[in-house]
Amino acid sequence: MRRIYMDHAATTYVDPEVVQAMLPYFTEFFGNASSFHSYGREAKEALEHSREVVAKALGASPEEIIFTSGGTESDNTAIKGVMYANRSTSHVITSMIEHHAVLETCGYLQEHGFDVTLLPVDKHGFISLNHLEDAITNETGLVTIMHANNEIGTIEPIKEIGRITRENDIYLHTDAVQSFGKIPTNVDDLNVDLLSISGHKIYGPKGVGVLYVREGVKIEPVQFGGGHERGMRSGTENVPGIVGLAKAVEISQREMEKESKRLIRLRDRLIEGVLKINDSWLNGHPTQRLSNNANFSFDRVEGESLILRLDAKGIAASTGSACSSGSGAPSHVLTSIGLTPERASGSLRLTLGKCNTEEDIDYVLEVLPEVVSDLRRISAI
């Protein structure tokens, strides 16, 4: 049976170049980067070279790069670390469509005495700059808005948000886990103070990520121990993973422009074909969205049944975020953009990647209408 992977927003395969870069650091250069002997120095050299690669991709300095276990840890460290370090402020602003790594962290702060404002979004998933300005108070210490949404692909106006936060002397964090490697993420161009990245979204290994922290940002660590990563993230560094992340970053910067154009062609063809199905809808902005993201809703179809039927046909897709796909509740992103729970429950997220081809689009457009029609025929909705 033909197998097609269209869930790259959940995770990606590890690029063979990345695997080859990592392998020596499992067996030959296996030293602890904190050790003073030659094995440790070899690991340390690889660690710092990786830091330079990531910094260059972000337009940052190596000293501003902290390696973490992934996007969730980076988000937690950015949000809690800034608010704990700046006790004179007690207010965080975020949006209703953030990843759970941000929303749950803000919820934790709220339970511990901080104030949190959740900004609404419009039908495309954009926050309003006017709403943001209205929400700012003298107590606001941090704004955290994702660069691009993981479910519907909408790209937020981070640069303009950054202008507002700078005018008000407020830190800005952005979760760039989905956007990095697909669109430019120069930290000065975006006006951000903190930024999160995850390796496994860009054909790197799982379990490794990055938090960019602009020089001068007042932040406290949330994990303690031996003082690794300049005291911001204690714990023996995952050198093979970090080397793999850096190689994935290097490849993403080399291929981004060409690959984005290719994916946009595939994405737009996919969207055009899927919307020929009766009572189908595109979620997110038609054009101001990530190059690989297409999110749909189908009336009178239950999303999990749709995913299972497609999987039986060899097509791997999702109904939304893989991090919360087992919750059973309608997507908070889709209900926030105005979808009813019924329509939100009939969603399908197809996210493309380097392995996808025109033939894959043909196959999906051949199979999906039949699957939707069959599900509607037997549906109790």
Image: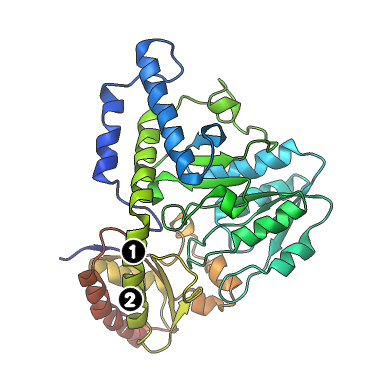
Q: Residues within 10 Å of mark 1 (few under 14, many from 20)?
A: many
Q: Distance between the residues labelled 2 and 1?
A: 10 Å
Left or right of residue 253, residue 155 in this image = right
The residue that mark 1 highlights is: 352
Mark toward the start of the polypeptide (2 vs 1): 2
Observer-nearest of 71 and 172:
172
- The answer to which image quadrant residue 258 occupies is bottom left
Say if 133 sits above or below 302 in the image: above
Mark 2 and mark 1 residues within 8 Å of each other at the beta carbon: yes
The residue that mark 2 highlights is: 270
User: Visible in this render: residue 274?
Assistant: yes
Percent position of residue 180, x then y:
46, 52
Q: Which residue is painted at 45% across and 46% down in the image?
A: 198
- The answer to which image quadrant residue 212 occupies is top right
Q: Residue furthest right?
A: 138
Q: Which residue is painted at 53% across and 66% down in the image?
A: 329
Q: Which residue is painted at 73% across and 68% down in the image?
A: 131
Left or right of residue 196, residue 255 in this image = left
Observer-nearest of 241 and 334:
241
Q: Which residue lies furthest to the top in this view?
A: 37
Q: Quadrant of the N terminus?
A: bottom left
Q: What residue type is labelled 2?
A: Leu
Say if 60 sits above or below 367 in the image: above
Left or right of residue 151, residue 195 in this image = right
Say if 274 sits above or below 201 in the image: below
Q: What residue type is labelled 1?
A: Leu
User: Visible in this render: residue 71?
Assistant: no
Q: Residue furthest left?
A: 1
Q: Which residue is painted at 41% across and 30% down in the image?
A: 49
Q: How crowded is mark 2: few (under 14 residues within 10 Å), some or many (20 or more)?
A: some
Say if 229 sits above or below 348 in the image: above
Percent position of residue 7, x then y:
35, 61
